[in-house]
Amino acid sequence: MRRKHKSNRQGAVLMTVTIVAVMMVVIVGAAISLVAHTNSRTNEEYRKKQAYFAASSCLEAFVVKETNMIADGTYTNDFIQQKLDELRDIAKSGTTATVKIGELNGAGEVDEGNLIGAKHARWNDITVTLRVVKIEGSNYSLKAIAVGKYLGKEAKVVAYMSTKELAMGKTVPGALEIIGTNGGGNSSYNNISVYGNTSAPLLESHNVNTIYSVTKNNSKFYGDTSIYGTLAFSGGSPKMTSNPYYVPGKDNGQTKGCTLYVSRSFTMNQNTGSLTSKYVKERNAVDPTKYDVAPKGENAFNYIQVDEAMCMMGDQCFVGETSHEIDIYTHLFSMGSHPSAITLTNGDNLLDAMAASVTNKVDDYKATVNGGGNGNGIKVYGNIYVRKLNDVFDGSAYLGAASEGNNCKIIGDLYVEGDVHVLKGFTIDGNIYIKPKGGAADTIANRVFGYSNLTFENSGKVEFVDWTLLGGRATVPNNFAPLPYYYYPEHMMCLPGESGMTVSTICNTYKNFYESDGVTLKPASDTTPHLTTDDNGKPTDTVNFESDVDVSDSNGNTKHFTVVAKKSFVLGGNGQKINNASILVDLDNAEANADGRHDIVIILGNNTTVMNNLEIIVKNQNHDSEGDDPRFCYLVSDSGVGIVNNEYATQAPLRTKESTYSNFIAKPYFNSNNRFNLQEWDTYFEVQKGHGLNPTDKEYNDPDIYDLPHGCIIMLLTEGATFVAPQETYMQCTIYGPRATFQWTNNGKSLKIYPAAEDGVDSIMTNIIGSCIIQNFVTSDNNNTIVYNPVSSKSMVAVAHGFAESLADRTFTLDRYDSY
């Protein structure tokens, strides 16, 4: 979930300056040829050819200088954008320039003292003018026109150039994003596994220190994990490991994984938390330079980055493994000691320093990050880089503990900008590198306290080195600022958008279900149908819904449904009953809605009485979710019609303000009670056949493994809304409710998920295939698993982070030449 932002450029403008064309050697040669032949040929055709040759040569030189460049190791995106702006500004200015033809000086400009006419007088009879104009009807095409004149004859040459439109940036969410709470309404990530990227973003992360506590049993995170606040492994055996969505050779925005970014502090408190990776990274390789590379791009894997303190005190906890090293980048590091036992160089207590930015429940924060573990048997396989942030997190390392912290070991090199405090016997299989401060007092004895407690293996040493200049693995990874949300579910339900920024594609359809008071649902009608059922799941309205239908497809799959819906509707509402309902949402045959699309909106009626099983299957076989006619099923909370504002769209030039809303229903509530099943049609049948599901880009070419399409089912939960998922619930959708609550009371459905199945995991108790962006993620005590599947880039959720333009990566490109 990391994206590039458009730069804030102060672009170079060439509105009225003279255009200086870069002339090639062929032009100088042509000048000599011209002088040599003019005496013998003075006819009209000859003069016209010379005018043409001068014009075409000058135009070609100009085109070479200004077009056909791409962003790569030679040209940056900013340089590319500057070139695009230059040509557009020249065209806008209407300037016609006289080209200077001559030799170049050392600065790459035409040397005024060496113009061709100064050495060959007859060249003074040739002039070439150049101008750039916009092609009528296109914002992405220009033409450059060169006119050559020689002894009364004239020739015109035109170069047609074009560039592609910059796509509006869209960012799909990660697998699990918990927005600014204490890790979920019950204070912890309990027993969950996440296949895909996990993050806890918050708009105010720069000044809020929220604690996320991972407790109980075996929570696992496969992919990149970004926590904006403090992360505590405070119980159980949590693990972070490699990313199954990374496929070598696929440009899908995924990394190899096993990366963890924490914007505050990270503590490994008790039991045996670990971070491991299946990807090799080692210091002592046959070719050590192979892994001595900066953790950027393809090499951004196997690392932990912590912006304040990293403290390891859990017994037997470890980071990395032999030949699968994981590097640590932090501003203070401790191994073996509790934060409360460490006095910093400036006299502060480390625990107090970590809690200084906490504004709520400070005692709870301290108890969580300081609790548990005796610091025994801790190991780090990889290098540790400790840079100075300030006088508190000053780049120091604290190894061992006075009364605990036995048998701790670093299998790697330790790099510090501050001091090293060895509080108890400690082993390092590597070296210690200290950045020198300078001066006579800057000695190893004054920088390594408790040196005699150190044991070095394999001839290790302590050495002064300004390692911050080394590059390679010593390079700090990207500091990932959280991507704030600028549009919320309220906007996606009620805000059409403006200036090409389409936010809602269902606003007319959704609003049509409410009375003018914006709160009361309209009575059931042909245009605002309500779905309620009898005890057998059959609809009480048989005009707007088909009842008791067997539905088949071209693949020979058939399923019985008690209800078939081909247009938007309210599900229950006002205490109405849904019982034993099996509902087909037929997007393939959906009626056009009030927005002129074929999306189907399901309003989850407040306080609906759901009894027994509720099944919703969405059939969308004929409309690719990434194609030209994507169709979506939206399940939205019964939130009424409030006021929506669009501050993001009206703020320029930098769009940094989130859009606001007001006057929506305060606490929409929907409890699906018992066995809620929400799936896409083909996935349903693949699961029924016992086939595996592949949400990744890996190609198996196996008829028993189904490649999941990008998601077309989206749940929108407004501020204060609650959705309760009951026992044995399985949902194939993207849940977007950054200010809502999602509550699990179940352990999901057993599914075969690839590539986990390839690694010997026969089945996974799966709750969500898609993603979940939620404020309060309240888990049960059973296993909860989220398997990431991207939502369609054509969906409304894809613009939740705003519409930042993509970076320019190519200048204008020459299409063709014409001459007149």
Image (spheres, rainbow, N blue to C red):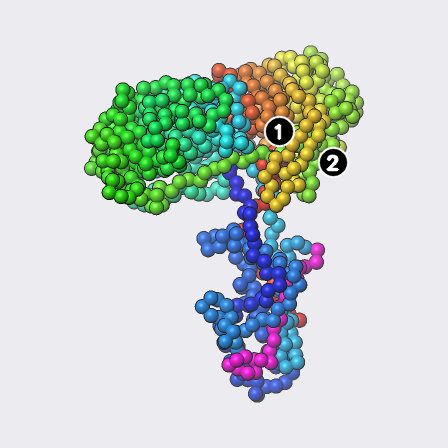
Q: Residue at x 39, y 30 (%)?
A: 309
Is residue 378 a member of the stretch shown in magenta?
no
Quadrant assignment, res 596? top right
Q: Earlier in the sequence, mark 1 or mark 2?
A: 2
Work out whether 693 lies above or below 236: below
Report whether residue 475 is seen.
yes
Image x and y of residue 678, in percent: 60, 23
Quadrant assignment, res 87? bottom right
Is residue 129 a member of the stretch shown in magenta?
yes
What residue does disc 2 label? Answer: 596
* Label ID, residue 548: none
Query: Along the horizontal axis of the image, is 370 left or right of 707?
Result: left
Amino acid at the residue labelled 1? Ile
| Quadrant assignment for the C terminus | bottom right
Q: Residue at x 47, y 70 (%)?
A: 105
Q: Residue at x 50, y 76 (%)?
A: 113
Label 1, residues with CA under 10 Å away: few <14, some 14-19, many ≥20: many
Image x and y of residue 695, in percent: 52, 32
Image x and y of residue 707, in percent: 53, 33
**Dot 1 lies on which element?**
strand
Label 2, residues with CA under 10 Å away: few <14, some 14-19, many ≥20: few
Distance between mark 1 and mark 2 Cα atoms: 19 Å
Image x and y of residue 793, in percent: 59, 38
What residue does disc 1 label? Answer: 714
In the rendered structure, which segment of residues is drawn in magenta? Answer: 117-137
Q: Which of 409 and 530 is in front in this view?
A: 409
